[in-house]
Amino acid sequence: MSDSTTTVSPEVSGFADARYAAVERVFRAQLESGEDLGASFCATVDGEVVVDLWGGWADEARTRPWEEDTIVNVYSTTKTMTALTALLLADRGELDFDAPVARYWPEFAANGKAEVKVSHLMAHSSGLSGWKAPMTLNDLYDWDKATSLLAAQAPFWAPGTACGYHAVTQGYLVGEVVRRIAGKSLGTVFREEIAEPLGADFHIGLPASEDHRVADLIPQPPPTEAPATPPSELLLNMFLNPPFSPLDTRTRAWRGAEIPAAGGTGNARSIAHIHMLMANGGVAKGKRLMSEAGCRRALEPQIEGVDLILGFQARYGMGFGLEPMIPLPGAESVFWCGYGGSLIIIDMKRRATYAYAMNRMGTAIIGDPRAVALARAVWEAV
């Protein structure tokens, strides 16, 4: 290791370039305080890894250390992989975001959806934030059933008029468009066209051979008091149809299924390395996979306003969140995060990525303070 880096102690492994020593201090403090049980954080600048840290425990009983190759379910941070796959097809001219979804998926035109655009799917404004038909957890593992029900149903609101977070459905919607174009599942296209070329350890549909490396998600403690305002019907539909638990992510059925909005498995290193592609104008690991213009389409504002599901002001670009939804390093930044705390920020101006993945789930809806504190410690030094 070069003199420009600081070696960290055994319970926290990896490195942080000397310029980013504050990041290691924050990372270590969060583990020591118990805010984190096990976690990883990685940052890249100009295509170079400047921070790569991991530590703590992969299980609540503290019998398995969080290792260099430990991976974990990152819930909605998976959406950025799905969005990037769609951006890749659009960059190649195979997908037009302004086209109606029905151009690629004719059955989708049913029930007043003939004019719904692919961009509406990307920006959570299609009105399909959940299923109207009763769903079970096993139905999420049945791609044809999950997508055919969405194609057949009417939207909950007029598409394109408002945003409402598509927590689980977005992956099936965008994923089916990708499947119709590529003739392969989204997880396969992502693996063959992005993850494997970049040598990135991120999976949408995890092989059973990798189960031994997966950290256990630790659910949030149950709330001690009722919410100030009752949850809306849309919110209840999104979270309870079907109901699912962080404990489901420990099963082979969940891990092996392609759930492209919530079921991805990886670590901070793989998340940062993949999005280096966007931060560096379409080039990562010495390989050009996209044009710079194709990457920057993520910055294009699609819709803003009070999110009908989340209940607060939201602003969506093409598949990513935009400022001021969470603190970001600048206007040329996009982000998304996962239920419980995982996060990726892509800073196109500074050509930087900041990624965090953990197993102790936090309570913030978006912008987990642990993740933001680590990212801020890097961007303030860049």
Image (spheres, rainbow, N blue to C red):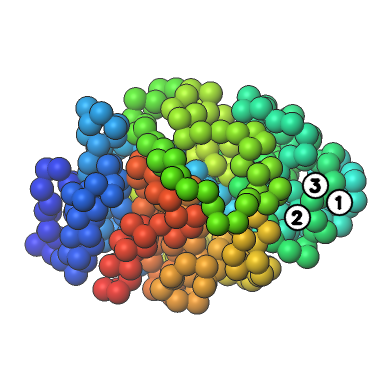
Q: Which three-letter amino acid code belongs to the residue tagged 3?
A: Tyr
Query: What's under tag 2, amino acid-wise?
Result: Ser
In the image, 189 versus 348, the foreground residue is: 348
Q: Label 1 to label 2, Cα distance in Å?
A: 9 Å
At 85% from the left and 46% from the top, the residue drawn is 154
Residue 310 relative to residue 6: left or right: right
User: x%, y% of residue 325?
Assistant: 52, 68
At label 1, the amino acid type is: Lys
Any part of residue 266 in sight:
no
Of 78 and 374, the residue lying toward us: 374
Q: Which mark is residue 104?
A: 3
Residue located beneath label 2 in the image = 126
* Mark 1 secondary-structure assignment: loop
Instruction: Give the number of the mark in front: 2 or 3.
Output: 2
Q: Nearer the viewer, residue 1 or 367?
A: 367
Tell me if residue 22 comes above or below residue 64 in the rendering: below
Residue in the picture at 52% in, 48% down? 226
- Which mark is on residue 113? 1
Q: Quick one: label 3, few (<14), some, or many (20+) residues within 10 Å?
A: some
Query: Which quadrant of the figure contains the N terminus?
Result: bottom left
Mark 3 / mark 1, whichever is N-terminal: 3
Dot 2: within a 10 Å radius of its alpha carbon, few (fewer than 14), some, or many (20 or more) residues?
A: many
Q: Is residue 107 above or below residue 300?
A: above
Residue located at (67% from left, 36% from top): 241
Locate residue 150, reporting x and y percent: 77, 40
Residue found farthest to the front: 225
Residue 217 visible, this angle = yes
